[in-house]
Image (tube, helix red, strand yellow):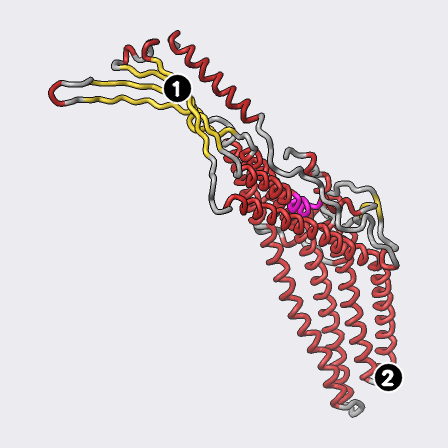
Amino acid sequence: MRPSMRPARARLKRTSALLTAALLGACSMAPKYVQPDSPVPQSWPDGEAYRDTVSTEPRPLTYAEVFADPALQGLIAQALENNRNLRVAAANIAAARAQVKVTRANQFPALATTASATHQETGGGFGLNGWSYALRAGVSNFELDLFGRLKNATAAQVNTALSTEAAARTVQLGLVADIAQGWATYAADRELLRIAEDTARIAGESVRLTQARLEGGIAARSELRQAQQVLETARSDLAAQKTALAQDVNALRLLVGADFDESALPGSITRVNAALAEVPASADTTILLSRPDVLEAEYSLRAANANIGVARAQLFPTISLSALTGFAAQSLSGLFDEASRSTSYGGSGEWSIFNAGGRSANVGVAKAQRDAALATYEGAIQTAFRETADALADQGTIAERLNAATNFTEVSADNARLVEATYRQGMASSLENLDAQRSLYAARQAEVGMRLARAVNRITLYRVLGGEWVSQPRPDEAAN
């Protein structure tokens, strides 16, 4: 480096330091953010429906803790790699983070250099003919953020990015829960298919027996038709369950985002229930504040609060500075001589005296948007409370309902065996036998439905309590 360039470089550094100091000393016109009070009770509802719920201190629950089946865990892991909605969410996060850098860059001086070489000729030989050279560097039109407009714009963009990340966690939480629910639904449909097959087989035997009795003159044609009704109902249900199973696989394939080994899918809802851990609720409702969707709404509220500062700062003057230093000479050999050096400083100010109230109206817009964001945040908490309270009420009685459904199936099965035995001995009518078969069929279907409801309840609790995301930092712990 030539000695003549060192003083210019030093002045340029001092200029940048002064501008940065002015930036860091900016005040903020944004109202101080105050954490809103939670609009829901501090504790969960109590009563008969909640007596069997489990309360504990909030802690993160990974999906591997709740969904213990290795095959299901493998399917979830595959989905986390391939699901297209997650890819969209990841791309949105990347874009939001990049936008933060774009917005934050406006807070700092932008250094630029220009170089030029100009050849000039004038008629008659008058003037300075020939080449001229120039090299300049510096800061042009750097806005001093005296009222925090740029600082608050950056804060708003940071919180928008954090809101986007929370939205992505909501997508991931929902994906895990949807796969687990699709897994359980497939198991229930497989079991319903077996029940339909058993019923169709038993109904077919009943039709054959009634046909023989009709031919023997000891049964009426109406009895045969009733037996055939049961058989055709079972056949229809059998076909419907085959369709349901195919659709269950299609739904899982969409969630996973790729093909998978269908042989690993569960064969019974009992297996699914055995592999689902109980999900305890926290002792109070503060856990809801860590749900990803609630965090998303809170970050949006913080961004709206910062935007008020942006709108208020626009009511005040804008001051910009420029500082350029460089060299200009008629020859390259003399370009960096001390005599060729030039430095210029300048500043400008702008203040809109009248714009028909437009900037004041912008403040009103920002405040209204903040109020809407506050209502959205409070609504998200209330929705989370309702969803969790509903799931806890379901959990509180589901064991009792499942026990009743199991007992009803056992009683119905025993009654069907007794009635069939007496029917074969001619001591019961075909109508009694058909009614017993119908009751058993309905009881078995209802029991499967209750076992599926139990599985879905545990999956729902994992979803509504925020899953493993309760361990994420609160917004007041993050940079604002």
Q: Which mark is residue 214?
A: none
- Span of residues in magenta: 291-298
Residue 264 visible? The answer is no
Residue closest to the far bottom: 217
Q: Nearer the viewer, mark 2 or mark 1?
A: 1
Q: Quadrant of the N terminus?
A: top left
Residue linked to disc 2: 428
Residue at (71, 77) in percent of width and height: 231
Q: Position of residue 413 (x, y in %)?
A: 84, 70
What amino acid does circle 2 point to? Ala
Q: Is residue 111 left or right of residue 101?
A: left
Which is more toward the observer, 407 or 158? 158
Which is more toward the observer, 161 or 129? 129
Residue linked to disc 1: 344
Residue closest to the far top: 3
Task: Please report contact status of discs 2 and 1: CB closer than 8 Å, yes or no.
Answer: no
